[in-house]
Each structure stands twice: as C-alpha cells, then as structure tokens.
Amino acid sequence: MREGNHYRGNYQTDHAVFCGYVTEQRSGHLEFFLYSPSEQIRRHSHWTCFVDRGDGWYLVHMGRQPKDLSSGIITIERLISEAYGS
C-alpha cells in the first residue's frame, strides 16, 4: 500500500511472512526495511546487510540499488527463502 513516498506490506515466502516497508527518497533511491528478522535470517550470510534502526526495524542494505521496487522486494524474499533453506 502506498502512502506518499512510503510503501507498506509484507515480504512473503513459502516459509515465512515479514512486515516491511520501502521509502523512496527524492533522488529515487529506495530503502527497504524488514521488521523483526527471525533467527534463520540472523544466521544467514547476508545478516551483515541488516542495520538495526530500533523498535525491531532493520534497514536492508543492498550492495547494488535495485532497478525498481519489485526487484528489491524479490531480492529480499529470495534472501528470506535462502535463510530457510530453499
């Protein structure tokens, strides 16, 4: 759901669902956030890409900026699936 320059929704996989949101900066840069990552995600090799922003929210730092909103969401959902072993 879009609210101004914020998008709210869930990252969904066959293994887990996580609350999230995306903020679009004026420059067009997208920042992706995930709420309360599980132990599986915390043990994943990309855990170092998660930056604690407080109150259970984590910024997911991406080495390469996704070309669009959907690509970023797919990247995070793929990471979640990998963390759960598929």
Image (tube, grey):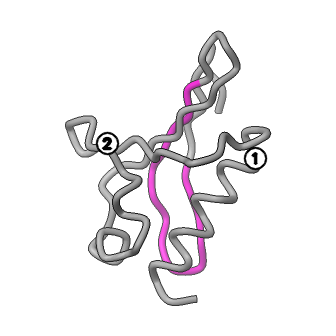
Predominant secondary structure in magenta?
strand
* Residue 38 shown in magenta: no
Tell me residue 62's x, y (percent): 55, 47
In this view, the residue in front, 9 or 86, is: 86
Sequence-wise first label, 2 or 1:
2
- Using the rendered view, name the quadrant where residue 44 is placed: bottom left
**Residue 42 percent across, percent down from the top left:** 30, 69
User: In the image, 17: left or right of 76?
Assistant: left
Q: Residues within 10 Å of mark 1 (few under 14, many from 20)?
A: few
Magenta stretch contains residue 12:
yes
Q: Secondary structure at mark 2?
A: strand
Q: Which residue range is magenta in the image?
A: 10-23
Task: Point out residue 5 in the picture as x, y percentages from the top left corner.
Answer: 62, 17
**Mark 1 — residue?**
70
Give the residue drawn at x 56%, y 57%.
11
Residue at point 65% right, 59% down?
A: 75
Residue type beneath disc 1: Ser
Q: Could you tell me which quadrant the N terminus lies in?
A: top right
State whether residue 27 is above or below residue 57.
Answer: above
Q: Residue furthest left?
A: 55
Secondary element at image label 1? helix
36 relative to 30 in the view: left or right: left
Residue matched to label 2: 57
Describe residue 47's horizontal placement relative to residue 1 as left or right: left
Residue drawn at x 79%, y 40% as measured from the top left? 67
Q: Amino acid at mark 2?
A: Trp
- Disc 2, disc 1: CB below 8 Å? no
Quadrant including the C terminus? bottom right
Q: Residue furthest front?
A: 63
- Mark 2–mark 1 Cα distance, whole angstroms, equals 20 Å
User: Tag 2: Cα neighbours inside 10 Å, few (<14), some, or many (≥20)?
Assistant: some
